[in-house]
Amino acid sequence: MAPLFREISQVAIKEFSDLHDLSQWTQLLIRLSVAIVLSGALGYERESRRSAAGLRTHMLVGLGAAIFILIPLQSGMTIIDMSRVLQGLIAGIGFLGAGAIIKVDKNREVYGLTTAASLWLTAAIGVSAGMGREATAVISTVLALIILSLLRRFKGGAR
């Protein structure tokens, strides 16, 4: 029995060895944490406005986008191949955002466009964090919060 358990444990250790040292663990945790926190900021703003996609949805989108970037980076994927990953991610998030859009025919009003756009932007922020572009992710989040919060007062002016 001992050789069997030894072999199983060696395989298990090998399967979980994608992060080889403390610096790789730290880098992963920083990038994923930045994606979660920044996406959460956008999600909190949307939730405070009672939009369909709130805190948890935005956090999951940002985290997912970061993971979809980190995995190819960790495996040594080329930039050309990364562009295909990004194309798929952008299209997939567009599909998710489309589900947040509701059109009311009798009033000819459309709801959820801002939520869909914030999900799309959240994915981009997650990509930025996943690629190690944390400053870009932070600046993008601040600008998005300015757009969502401060420019809200100009929404009702002209129709």
Image (tube, rainbow, N blue to C red):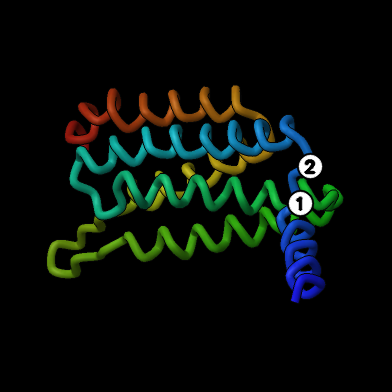
Give, as a three-letter code, the residue at label 2.
His
Residue most toward the left? 106
- Residue 41: image x %, image y %? 37, 33
Q: Could you classify mark 1 by the number of other residues whose Cα lies within 10 Å: few (under 14), some (14-19), or many (20 or more)?
A: few
Q: Nearer the viewer, residue 127 or 156?
A: 127
Q: Nearer the viewer, residue 91 or 60?
A: 60
Residue wearing tag 2: 20
Vertical comparison of 74 with 109: above or below: above
Residue wearing tag 1: 17
Vertical comparison of 69 with 108: above or below: above
Q: Quadrant of the N terminus?
A: bottom right
**Is disc 1 in contact with disc 2, using a CB cutoff of under 8 Å?**
yes
Q: Quadrant of the C terminus?
A: top left
> Could you tell me which residue is drawn at 83 percent across and 48 percent down?
79
> Could you tell me which residue is drawn at 32 percent across and 44 percent down?
55
- Residue 145: image x %, image y %? 37, 28
> Could you tell me which residue is drawn at 61 percent across and 43 percent down?
127
- Residue 74: image x %, image y %? 77, 47
Q: Kindly state the secondary structure of the residue where label 2 is placed.
A: loop
Q: Kindly state the secondary structure of the residue where label 1 is placed.
A: loop
- Left or right of 129? Residue 11 is right
